[in-house]
Amino acid sequence: MPLSGDKFIKINEERAKDVINEERVRDVLRKVDAEGDGDGRLNKEELKVALRQLGSRNAAWRYRRCLSHADDNKDGLVSEKEQEELVKYLVAKYGN
Ligand SMILES: [Ca+2]
Ligand SMILES: [Ca+2]
């Protein structure tokens, strides 16, 4: 990849850090899973990391709130299908 392209992406990421919208939340969730077990679903550890990245100071227990909102089938994981609810919840909670 050309250097100019890398630089452009980097600058974009820096700017996006302050803004929490659906796109940003989806991006964070995708990355957290990719850096976790990469199964396409979010487990509680991955949720905690995502919450911290979105600026939550209480990620250690707030992930439960996320699960109660998004985990329809109560398997303790937020699947791709359930993720839309989570994205909406997180934007409402941390969006600006
Ligand atoms: Ca996962
Ligand atoms: Ca689930």
Image (spheres, helix red, strand yellow):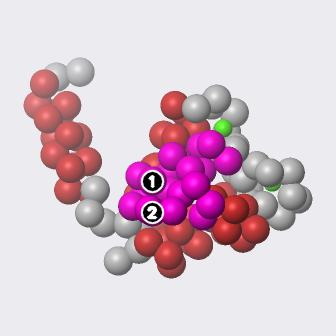
Q: Position of residue 19 (x, y in %)?
A: 30, 66
Is 75 magenta? The answer is no
- Report the amino acid beneath label 1: Arg
Label 1 CB sits under 8 Å from any ligand 1 atom: no
Q: Residue at x 59, y 72 (%)?
A: 89
Quadrant placement of the N terminus: top left
Classed neighbour count for the residue bearing mark 2: other residues with Cα under 10 Å, few (<14), some (14–19), many (≥20): some
- Report the amino acid beneath label 2: Ser
Q: Are marks 1 and 2 in contact (CB under 8 Å)?
A: yes
Is 46 magenta? The answer is yes
Q: Residue at x 63, y 31 (%)?
A: 38
Name above or below for residue 82 compared with residue 14: below
Residue 7 in view here: yes
The foreground one among 59 and 11 is 59
Q: Which residues are magenta?
A: 44-62
Report which residue position mark 1 lands on. 52
Q: Residue at x 76, y 49 (%)?
A: 77
**Left or right side of 12 for 36:** right
Quadrant for ligand 1 reads top right
